[in-house]
Image (cartoon, rainbow, N blue to C red):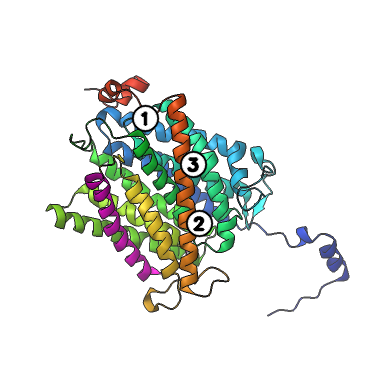
Amino acid sequence: MKKYAWSPLLIIYCLLFPSLAFADELSPGNTSWILTATALVLFMTIPGLSFFYAGIVRSKNVLSVLMQCFAITCMVSILWFMYAYSMAFGAGNDWVGGLDKLFMAGVTEDAMIGDIPETVFSMFQLTFAIITPALIVGAFAERMKFSAMLIFSAIWLTLVYAPVTHWVWGGGWLGNMGLLDFAGGTVVHVTAGSAALVAAIVMGNRYGFPHTAMPPHNLTMTVAGAGMLWVGWFGFNAGSALAANGDAGMAMMVTHISASAGAMTWMIAEWIKYGRPSVLGIVTGMVAGLGTITPASGFVGPAGAIVIGILAGFICFGATNYLKRVLKIDDSLDVFPVHGVGGILGTFLAGIFSSTELGIFSGQGFAEGITSMGEQIGIQLIGIAAVLVYTIVITFIILKILDIVIGLRVTKEEEIEGLDIILHEERGYII
């Protein structure tokens, strides 16, 4: 190791200007990777999630789903600029960020978060804020007014997503407690999944459900969207390392392993139960594997990931069938049983497979200051419960108020006609 001589002038400079003397220098490699990851995560929503959802609905509603995802992308981007980024990551208290970054105040070319520009960090986090309310679209697909969807998404982003993001990633109480959520098990999947369940219950079932068959109109589109989601998820999870390093590499590996295991498990379970494997089943299992590994992706190893993927495929498959066939709740595109259950499961399992004492199943270690698996699991359960209860309560209040003020659903006649022509005066297919 080389020894360096410190001149008196340099010492005085460092004492007078410590923030300048020790400021993080920009890392071109890390910045390039997060720029790429940002594009990948945006790709997950438009076109990935958009195509995935649009192919599953009936042909008379294909444009409505595409429109909802696209409009959410635009609206959330503007709200993020105005105040949501500040609420999530501004200097505040344990519960919500302050107003110091309203309208991106201080987010200049020279502003840094670690060794990447704050502009890049903010854009990366924006793509998470976009996909989370877009996921909820799958719960009320084919029956919600477009105006109600826009207002609900805006209020929900403000009252649910931004505060919960601050709790976990913005210096809030759950992050300080030691909750392990690498890329959004609670922030994205538990919030979106639980909100979806509430929306499905409050709005009621689609006309004809569960007695009328409502098969996907274009599974080719759905499979294409699923592939885009899979590729984009590498930015989602590996990008959350905020660096081009070994953590990002491991996150990418375990993400792929869990997705593959989830897809295969769901396919086999469906094959056994119904006598044949379906295309919709294998791609849904893939999404379940991806959602479940998300909170654990920066903390577990490959062997832990394959167990997480297998459990995701099996448990989310069972939850989907139970919700629709037993409880008869019309979560149209299975948002809660896939994302909600997957997010809960993955956040819990992160507390187990992050342990360094499980042999081949060992992970990267518990949160700083946590010394036992029991303590880490306890924190994971607190995080799951807090986010779940808060999201359910606030989402219910938002929906009930909106239903009273403007109404949530189109009429029965409009629903039968289809949202494409009723709400947008357009058709997805001209025959």
- Residue 388 visible: yes
Dot 3: within a 10 Å radius of its alpha carbon, few (fewer than 14), some, or many (20 or more) residues?
A: some
Residue for badge 2: 240
Task: Name the amino acid type tagged 2.
Answer: Ser
Mark 1 / mark 3, whichever is N-terminal = 1
Tell me the CA gap for discs 2 and 3: 27 Å
Instruction: Check if residue 293 falls in the magenta segment.
Output: no
Observer-side mark, 2 or 3, equals 3
Q: Residue at x 15, y 55 (%)?
A: 273
What secondary structure do most residues of the magenta stretch adopt?
Answer: helix
Per the rendering, the mark at residue 144 is: 1
Instruction: Please tell me whether residue 358 is drawn above or below residue 407 in the rendered image.
Output: below
- Residue 294, given in percent of the width and then of the height, sits at 42, 57
**Span colored in magenta:** 298-327
Mark 2 / mark 1, whichever is N-terminal = 1
Per the rendering, the mark at residue 394 is: 3
Q: Residue at x 63, y 58 (%)?
A: 114
- Residue 224, given in percent of the width and then of the height, sits at 30, 44
- Residue 55, given in percent of the width and then of the height, sits at 28, 38
42 sits left or right of 271 in the view:
right
Q: Quadrant of the N terminus?
A: bottom right
